Image (spheres, helix red, strand yellow):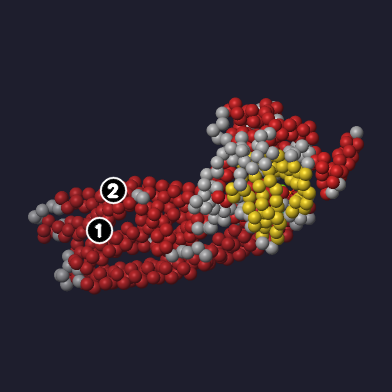
Amino acid sequence: MPSSGIAPTLWRLWPYLWQYRLRVALALLCLIGAKLAAVAAPLAFRQIVDDLDPARLALTFPLTLLCLYGVLRFAASLFTELREIIFARVTQQSIRRLALEVFCHLHALSLRFHLERQTGGMSRDIERGTHAIATLINYTLYSILPTLVEMTLVLVILWREFPPIFALVTFFSLLVYGCFTVLVSNWRIEIRRRVNETDSAANSRAIDSILNYETVKYFSNEAFEARAYDERLGNWAEAATKSQVSLSYLNLGQQLIVAVGVTLMMWLTARGVADGEMSVGDLVLVNAFLMQLYLPLNFLGVIYRELRQAMTDIGRMFELLSTHQEVSDRPDAAVMPAGAQEVRFKDVHFAYDPARPVLRGVDFVIPAGHTVAVVGTSGVGKSTLARLIFRFYEVTGGAITCNGRDIRAFTQESLRALIGIVPQDTVLFNDTLYYNIHYGHPEASREAVLAAARAAQLAGFVESLPEGWETRVGERGLKLSGGEKQRVAIARALLKNPAILIFDEATSALDSHTEWAIQKQLEAAARGRTTLVIAHRLSTVMNADEILVMEGGRIVERGRHDALLRQGGLYARMWERQRSERREGMEDAI
Ligand SMILES: Nc1ncnc2c1ncn2[C@@H]1O[C@H](COP(=O)(O)OP(=O)(O)OP(=O)(O)O)[C@@H](O)[C@H]1O
Ligand SMILES: [Mg+2]
């Protein structure tokens, strides 16, 4: 549950505001200045009214006071605007800092977290959270604090200038007003929630129905769809009516309290004037104060509701920030030294979910500069090996070492800097082809990028495009074919020029001709590097220094291609099956 108390939320926001303490202090001074001017204006006005008394008018015309009144009115606005100017930067920069912090934190969270969370929901949480900060700061600074300051000032003046009953009546009517508003608003929050819920329900029903346009037609179910939609619209209309009516109750109640308070005060003042204890100016003053006080209170209900919503939203964002990092650097983590790497899996056990082990004691070594291939049926845990080398997850037993040192002893950043991967599923940034390849090594020159693209057999394809390198690849790279995407991934892995290379089904989406051409390039790229190749098509791994055959979370066979064939085990059977499929494929083609 996100905490929604105002104090803890403000407390957590404090560090962001504290860095602008000078501006905060200045803004507060402006706020007090504006309110002093705002309450001084009616005081001047009282004097003007009293001076206009025919009995006194003969003596002096209150010109100075009139000018002062104008100046005070303007000063109130001037200070208010100054406060906004001074504070704008604080709000926006705090939002910026917090949004960046959340963003970096999201990158630091584990792959598991990201696979389990819906990205859409998460980005809405962040957006709402940052928006809520603006709401919170704005309402607190621009509505609540000014109103409180003004109330205090007015109460102090009333207390000093008039008999105590004036301040007491004002104070209690404000108190009753505030309590009533909070109580009714709490009740209305439920109603508002119901309006929003029914609204989304109706909306999603409509969208789902339209998305299924063809299915609706296939079954001639238009009337059925309309009924279902109308039913939800009915719920919404019901809730919305209730919300509207309850708002009227709130307004009515508030106005009743105001009317009673004002009448009482005016009655007290009028009696004072009648008794000769007060002047007409006093009557005007009290009236002006009451108007000034009650006007901003009209929005109290809305402000209260928005603030509560803002607290919840901010709470949710902070909750995201306090999500524990599953894979984190040790305090004494070292930077991994560059250079040739020997990668070793020492009796590695691993499970995504404790109830279902994936790796049960995997043991192998890739000597520096060698190529080891892993084959096995789908779901046996091959890609998992790559994720573990990258430390997307921690091994549950055993260890992975590089040049004899556990990879957990290094910072994740330095470890990942030395590894290049062509993943099984490539996702691209919604940008240009050039950008996506350049991403592999942002400092690389244009020549290097083009060379990597040539090696990945991309050059011909790019030249055939009307926009060439500047072609945009669409969301997640969906405008490219599977094979094109894979070649972009190969190009950017080659551009990174890492000490350790991992090819996870790097050529699975390519036709055999392109695959053959790229295979040569990949073998050339692998030369002198520690390389792990994961493949289904055994013909692509037959030149590896060692081939590991996985089954049931373990390595069941290992050796070079010829030796494994001679052994006549699982590998030999897989080879035979793929060869006959290939032959059949070729015969079909003829
Ligand atoms: N994030 C995850 N959470 C839970 N289970 C997972 C997760 N990722 C993979 N698995 C499971 O772990 C097992 C091994 O997955 P892995 O991706 O390593 O298989 P693979 O050998 O690469 O298969 P393929 O040849 O189909 O790519 C699979 O049974 C899969 O369902
Ligand atoms: Mg895989």
Q: Is residue 124 visible?
A: no
The C terminus - image quarter? top right
Residue 78, numbered circle: 2
Q: Nearer the viewer, residue 16 or 354?
A: 354
Q: Quadrant of residue 494?
A: top right
Where is residue 183 shown, x and y percent of the image? 43, 70
Disc 2 or 1, which lies upstream in sequence?
1
Residue 503, above or below 362? above
Q: Residue at x 53, y 58 (%)?
A: 323
Q: Is residue 272 visible?
A: yes
Label 1: which residue?
Answer: 39
Q: Are marks 2 and 1 in contact (CB under 8 Å)?
A: no
Where is residue 285 shown, x and y percent of the image? 23, 62
Judged left or right of residue 460, residue 147 is left
Residue 504, above or below 466? below
**What is the crowding at mark 1: few (fewer than 14 residues within 10 Å), some, or many (at least 20)?**
many
Q: Give the amino acid at mark 1.
A: Val
Judged left or right of residue 376, residue 584 is right
